[in-house]
Image: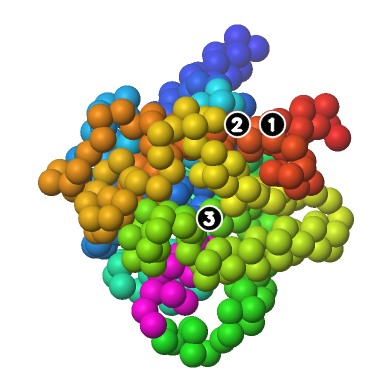
Amino acid sequence: MTSSLALDCCFIVVITTFLMAFGFGSAQPTRAFFVFGDSIADNGNNHFLATTARADNPPYGIDFPSHKATGRFSNGLNIPDLISERLGLEAPLPYLNPLLIGEKLLVGANFASAGIGILNDTGFQFLDILHIDKQLKLFDHYQQRLSAHIGAEETKKLVNKALVLIILGGNDFVNNYYLVPFSARSRQFSLPDYVTYLISEYKKILRKLYNLGARKVLVTGTGPMGCVPAELALRSRNGDCDLELERAASLYNPQLIEMVKVLNREIGVDVFIAVNAHRMHMDFITNPAAFGFVTSKEACCGQGPYNGIGLCTPLSNLCQNRDLYVFWDQFHPSEKANRIIVKQILTGSNEYMHPMNLSTILAMDSIGV
């Protein structure tokens, strides 16, 4: 009996040592977080790729805790960072980061890559980026890696319980359909037909996410594409938002919300939550002073009209107080603007979040509804 007990104790010590060696010795996080999409969500994957779509030089990251460029297209924290912060979660690492091993796998992963879209031909000019099909393949690979450590059943539970954020669509317009006059896609489709095609392709992507185990998915629509400094610099004569790009947004975003409704009905439960990013942005674009901004037209970092020409670089114009600017660079919101967006994701009404906001989702989940 004593011999058997000693063997059991020895076995437990060996297993515990094995788990700790792979970084699984401490308690698991309360919820994993997975992120997919483009530069709004990228937190450094493109840093590890041979691409021109990168944010790994100053002044990017000037207000990040480390004050260093991390690959985020922001002066500081981006939307996934701020969701993690508000929920008390550790922000997931970029999937391509070699530090994503051991216990860090339990936190989740960020697969987002700047420049990508719903369509795989979007962003071709940026060379080596993680198109959405590749991101989903990496998500499957992530689950295989995690299963090797905690088993297939525990991996499935972690993924089913996880929060998922996907941000797609904007690049399919500004870096595809409207990239150049008479682009291939604009010759192939009228704008209404193109939007219909995008929505149908996006639905397939969301179905794949569901089949890979995602059960709580925030699906973000496009922002006001015609109002970003890059488009004001190229298309606006008086500072007004470009009507053609805003027409695209007005066609796309309502159809995205309707597609999410249909998909949830087909599945039989509200897996997908539509985020009305356009409405969120327009609140402070149309009335910046109400949110403490001095401008919603000029980027903090850049050059040319509205600081909207070219990349943000160490040689660019740079504002002193980033909290006064809606836009950090020619396309991307400042950290302060991102904080306003995330607040609406957490607590916004049905005008912003459909069928419910994130706080409601998590409250229902906590009581097993």
Residue at x-position 51% and y-position 44%: 285
From the viewer's perspective, is residue 186 above or below residue 16?
below
Residue 336 visible in the picture: yes
Q: Which residue type carries mark 1?
A: Thr
Q: Main secondary structure of the magenta part?
A: helix
- What label sits on residue 224 in the rendered view? 3
Q: Which stretch is magenta? A: 169-181
Q: Quadrant of the N terminus?
A: top right
Image spot of residue 139 (x, y percent): 52, 55
Residue 186 is marked as none
Rendered location of residue 218, percent (x, y): 64, 47
Identify the mark nearer the N-term, 1 or 3: 3
Assess whether mark 3 and mark 1 are in contact (beta carbons under 8 angstroms).
Answer: no
Q: Which residue shows up at 49% across the image and 90% down it?
A: 187
Q: Residues within 10 Å of mark 2 (few under 14, many from 20)?
A: some
Query: In terms of depth relative to the viewer, which is nearer, 156 or 230?
Result: 230
Secondary element under disc 2, as helix, strand or loop, is helix
Vertical side of 250 occupied by 146: above or below: above
Amino acid type, callout 2: Lys
Residue beneath disc 1: 347
> In screen coordinates, is 352 left or right of 118?
right
Location of the C terminus by quadrant is: top right
Instruction: Say left or right for 13 vs 203.
Output: left
Q: Residue 343 bears which disc, if any?
A: 2
